[in-house]
Image (cartoon, rainbow, N blue to C red):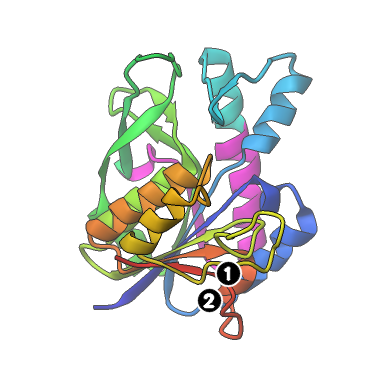
Amino acid sequence: MEKLSIIKIGGNIIEDETALNAFLKLFSNLEGKKILVHGGGRRATIVASKLGIESQMVNGRRITDAETLEVITMVYGGLVNKNIVAKLQALDIDAIGLTGADINSIQSVKRPVKEVDFGFVGDVENVAHQSIDKLIQADFTPVFCAITHDGNGQLLNTNADTITSQVAIGMSKLYETSIYYCFEFNGVLENINDKNSVVKHIDTNIYKDLLAKGIIVDGMLPKLENCFNALQNGVTAINMGNTEMLTQENDNFTKITL
């Protein structure tokens, strides 16, 4: 099976021009077939406040009313996505910017209202892996922003980590698929105040142990739940750390396996 790398970057890289340029250079040098997924929440918050729209967050997740959805569509699908695509073209990567609505690539269902009404937020139901593969086979590099659709004309704000794992699960029907979650830390840390205390390998047993010790908390919980779900559904390997893990020389990151 041919290899496919799926790389996700967050707002901390997107907001820092130098970091973004350095990352895209590493991404462009990455051998083989690849897909990029990006968020852009920080930029959306800045643009929304300039427009006098207040951003509401619950448990680190954005409440997406109709006004906020307009801002997110402009920022994620326009400003951030096209900026990344243009920079990749300059590095000789023939990138194509996408939302989940493009080529019907990622369909979602609007999140049902339980304790919280998240508004126009989508939970991924279907990834059109054959359609995405047509782009890859044509030597295009897909760049997905964090927007999906419901198949009835409604765009939905969707967590970028989830898009990454769901696209990886879909593509693993055709490729040996690895995920790289790039963020500001070197990996999953044993001690949040010591940036070098990287847990280099996590499997299901080590994960239970880290949970019991209270090392994995807050935003890292859903991230890792997502990871194990992806591994149980066909993804080969998942790596977490800073962008340097995309180089051959660096082994200081967290590798997650079953």
Q: Position of residue 196 (x, y in %)?
A: 67, 69
Q: Residue at x 64, y 72 (%)?
A: 244
> The residue tagged with tag 2: helix, strand or loop?
loop
Identify the image quadrant of residue 41. top right
Q: Which residue is mark 2?
A: 30
Q: Magenta stretch: residue 100 in it?
A: yes
Q: Work out whether 240 lies above or below 44.
A: below
Identify the image quadrant of residue 111. top left
* Range of magenta residues: 75-103
CB atoms of marks 1 and 2 within 8 Å: yes
- In the rendered structure, the answer to whether residue 39 lies left or right of residue 121 reads right
Q: Residues within 10 Å of mark 2 (few under 14, many from 20)?
A: some
Q: Magenta stretch: residue 32 in it?
A: no
Res. 158 in view = yes
Q: Residues within 10 Å of mark 1 (few under 14, many from 20)?
A: many
CA separation, marks 1 and 2? 5 Å
Q: Position of residue 222 (x, y in %)?
A: 43, 42
Instruction: From the image, give the main secondary structure of the stretch colored magenta.
Output: helix
The N terminus, quarter of image: bottom left
Q: Nearer the viewer, residue 144 or 56?
A: 56
Q: Work out whether 69 lies above or below 223.
A: above
Q: Position of residue 58 (x, y in %)?
A: 54, 22
Looking at the rendered structure, the kind of residue marked 1 is Phe
Q: Which residue is mark 1?
A: 27
> The residue tagged with tag 1: helix, strand or loop?
helix
Identify the image quadrant of residue 103. top left
Q: Work out whether 121 lies above or below 103.
A: above
